[in-house]
Amino acid sequence: MTVPPALFPERLQDAPLVEGLIARAFGPGRFAKTAERLREDAGRPVRELSFVAWSEGVAVGCVRLWPVDIGGTPALMLGPFAVDEAWRRQGLGAALILRACDEARRRGHGLIVLVGDEPFFGPLGFSSAEARRVRLPGPVDQRRVLVRALRPGAADNLAGRVHAAHPAIPA
């Protein structure tokens, strides 16, 4: 019997395993994406808000949050998240995303933005409606820009361009 994955904050030493999961899930094409450019500019993920799923000592999933700014409003960018092929379609990706969102809210953050499919992310609290005036640099399908407010009113009047923020934004 396989042990269900346990979710823990990403540690510095987990980075090579997380990068491996992401590479297997997305391949080298991910480096051409606008969201990847923002992550590179941010420098490093917010480790205490990024999680790794472990099963029997093996990293089987991950999610990262990055510091960004949306038109002057501090926010976080979610992504990438990846799940090992053997663990897909079992709810692990959703569990990772919800854990990261819950921890971000607990630490006082107000907004998370991502580029993704609303049919998957909508049930997790993300909406394209709240992101209608949010712009990412570079080419991106605006219909795939989604926002989740972590507290009431956090996305009110949200507008502007997304920029990488300093990795040490206050929690």
Image (spheres, rainbow, N blue to C red):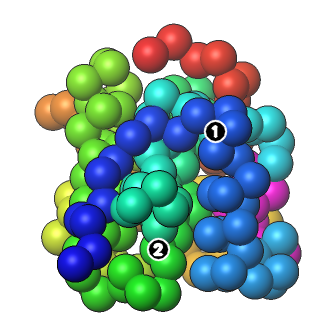
Write down the residue under mark 2: 83
Q: Where is residue 139 in the image (x, y as percent from the top left)?
A: 75, 74
| Looking at the image, residue 110 lies above or below residue 95 | above
State which region is magenta. Answer: 32-39
Question: Which residue does the image show at 24% across and 65% down from the upper left?
Answer: 4
Calculate the distance from the C-alpha at mark 1 to the C-alpha at mark 2: 18 Å
The amino acid type of the residue labelled 1 equals: Pro
The amino acid type of the residue labelled 2 equals: Val
Secondary structure at badge 1 equals loop
Question: Which residue does the image show at 39% across and 61% down from the upper left?
Answer: 56
Is residue 130 in view from this perspective? no
Of residues 50 and 13, the one drawn nearer to the viewer in this rendering: 13
- Which mark identifies residue 1? none
User: Is label 1 or label 2 in front?
Assistant: 2
Q: Mark 2: few, some, or many residues within 10 Å (few <14, many ≥20)?
A: many
* Quarter of image, res 29: bottom right
Q: Position of residue 69 (x, y in %)?
A: 60, 34
| Looking at the image, residue 155 lies above or below residue 124 | above
Horizontal arrangement in the rendering, residue 110 relative to residue 164 (left or right): left
Secondary structure at badge 2 equals strand
Asked if disc 1 and disc 2 are in contact, CB closer than 8 Å, the reply is no
Question: Which residue does the image show at 75% across and 53% down from the upper left?
Answer: 16
Q: Where is residue 71 in the image (x, y as percent from the top left)?
A: 58, 36
| Looking at the image, residue 19 lies above or below residue 47 | below
Horizontal arrangement in the rendering, residue 152 relative to residue 162 (left or right): left
Of residues 83 and 127, the one drawn nearer to the viewer in this rendering: 83
Question: Which residue does the image show at 33% across and 20% down from the upper left?
Answer: 107
Write down the residue under mark 1: 45
Q: What is the residue that sits farthest to the front in this orientation?
A: 1
Horizontal arrangement in the rendering, residue 30 relative to residue 6 (left or right): right
Residue 46 lies in the magenta stretch: no
